Image (cartoon, helix red, strand yellow):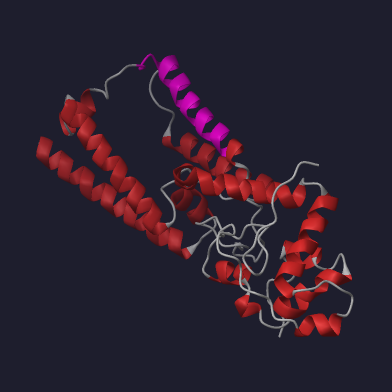
C-alpha cells in the first residue's frame, strides 16, 4: 500500500525526476512509509520541512 | 477621532477581514501563532532555509546533493531498480539536521478538504506584527489617547503603579500558555475558526466568552 501523502509530498515528485532516485519511492513511499520521517512528522501533526528526506537527512540551501 | 465604531461596523470589518484573508491567501488569520513562531526563531529560520533549498536553490546542485544522499542511504545509485528496491537504507547519521517546525499539520485541510497555503516566511510575519503595533499606535495618536498609562478604568478595576505591570505580565504568561495549549487565540479561534465552523474553535470561543463574562462580573462585583 502506498503512502497517503504521495499526492501532496513535494519529494515524491522530486524522486520521479531521475530513475536513480526512485529507490526512495520504492523503499518508503510504496512500501515502508511508516518508517518515513516525513510521514511520522505529519502523522504527529507537525510541520514537515520540504527539504527533509524520508530518512531524516536534509537537503541544504544553496544559492543559485 | 473620538469614541469607538458601532459594534456592528466593527463586526462587519472583522468578518470581512477574516474571510477575505482566507479567500485571498488561503491561510487562517491568527496572531498567537505568528507570535509563537518568534519563540523558536532558530527552528523557523531552518525551515525557511529548507523551503529555499527546494524552491529557489541551484537545481543542479540540489540534484547532485540528492544523489550523494541517496548513495549514502542506499549504498549505491543506479538504474537497476529491482536491486535498488531491495536495498536497506542506513539510519540517519547522528548530527544530521533535525526535523523542524511545529504547530501545524503538514497538509492542514479545510472543512471542504482543501489544503492551506504554505506558511509564509518569517519576514512576512515580522512585517505583520510590526504593522499591527503601528496600526494600534496610529489609532491611539489619532484619538489623542497615546500615553504611558493604561487608563483610569484599568487602574480602578485591576491595579495601579508597579502592581499593574505585574498583573499584565502574569496575564500575558497565562495568555501565552493558554493559546499554546489550545492551538490558537481569540483571533484564530474566535474569528477564523468560528467563521469556518470548526468544532474545536467553537468550543474554544465558548470557553473564552464564558471566562470573559465571569471575569467581568467578578470585577464589577469587586468595584461595586
In the picture shown, does residue A20 fall above or below B186? below
Q: Is residue B39 left or right of residue B83?
A: left
Q: Taking the image as drawn, is residue A12 in sight?
A: yes
In the picture shown, does residue B105 fall above or below B120? below
Give the x, y percent position of residue A24. 75, 73
Which residue occupies the foreground of this view, A52 or B202? A52
Q: Per the image, is B130 magenta?
A: yes
Which residue occupies the foreground of this view, A42 or A60? A60
Question: Which quadrant: the N terminus of chain B?
Answer: top left
In the picture shown, does residue B147 fall above or below B210? above
How many marks the image carries: the answer is 0
In the picture shown, does residue B136 fall above or below B41? above
Question: Which quadrant: the C terminus of chain B?
Answer: top left
Task: Look at the magenta stretch and give its main secondary structure.
Answer: helix
Q: Is residue B208 left or right of residue B85?
A: left
Q: Is residue B192 left or right of residue B84?
A: left
Residue under the point 16% across and 45% down:
B218
Residue under the point 44% across and 52% down:
B184
Give the x, y percent position of residue A46. 53, 62
Which residue occupies the foreground of this view, B119 or B217? B119
Give the x, y percent position of residue B195. 52, 53
Q: Per the image, is A31 magenta?
A: no
Give the x, y percent position of residue B5. 44, 28
Point out the stretch of residues depicted in magenta. B125-146
Q: Taking the image as drawn, is residue B37 in sight?
A: no
Amino acid at each position: 500500500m502506498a503512502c497517503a501523502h504521495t499526492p501532496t509530498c513535494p519529494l515524491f515528485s522530486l524522486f520521479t525526476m531521475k530513475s536513480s532516485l526512485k529507490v526512495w519511492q520504492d523503499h518508503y513511499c510504496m512500501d515502508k512509509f511508516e518508517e518515513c520521517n516525513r510521514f511520522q512528522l505529519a502523522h504527529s501533526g507537525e510541520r514537515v520541512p520540504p527539504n527533509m528526506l524520508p530518512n531524516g537527512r536534509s537537503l541544504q540551501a544553496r544559492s543559485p | 477621532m473620538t469614541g469607538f465604531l458601532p459594534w456592528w461596523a466593527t463586526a462587519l470589518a472583522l468578518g470581512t477581514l477574516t474571510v477575505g484573508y482566507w479567500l485571498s491567501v488561503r491561510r487562517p488569520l491568527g496572531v498567537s501563532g505568528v507570535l509563537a513562531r518568534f519563540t523558536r526563531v532558530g527552528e523557523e529560520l531552518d525551515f525557511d532555509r529548507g523551503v529555499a533549498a527546494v524552491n529557489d536553490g541551484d537545481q543542479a546542485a540540489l540534484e547532485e546533493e540528492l544523489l550523494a544522499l541517496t548513495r549514502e542511504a542506499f549504498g549505491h545509485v543506479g538504474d537497476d531498480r529491482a536491486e535498488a528496491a531491495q536495498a536497506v537504507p542506513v539510519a540517519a547519521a547522528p548530527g544530521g539536521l533535525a526535523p523542524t517546525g511545529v504547530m501545524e499539520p503538514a497538509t492542514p485541510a479545510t472543512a471542504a478538504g482543501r489544503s492551506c497555503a504554505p506558511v509564509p516566511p518569517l519576514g512576512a510575519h515580522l512585517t505583520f506584527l510590526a504593522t499591527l503595533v503601528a496600526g494600534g499606535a496610529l489609532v491611539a495618536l489619532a484619538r489623542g489617547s497615546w500615553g504611558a498609562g493604561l487608563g483610569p478604568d484599568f487602574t480602578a478595576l485591576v491595579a495601579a503603579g508597579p502592581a499593574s505591570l505585574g498583573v499584565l505580565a502574569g496575564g500575558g504568561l497565562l495568555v501565552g500558555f493558554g493559546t499554546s495549549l489550545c492551538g490558537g487565540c481569540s483571533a484564530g479561534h474566535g474569528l477564523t475558526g468560528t467563521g469556518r465552523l470548526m468544532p474545536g474553535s467553537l468550543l474554544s470561543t465558548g470557553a473564552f466568552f464564558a471566562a470573559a463574562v465571569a471575569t467581568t462580573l467578578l470585577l464589577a462585583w469587586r468595584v461595586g
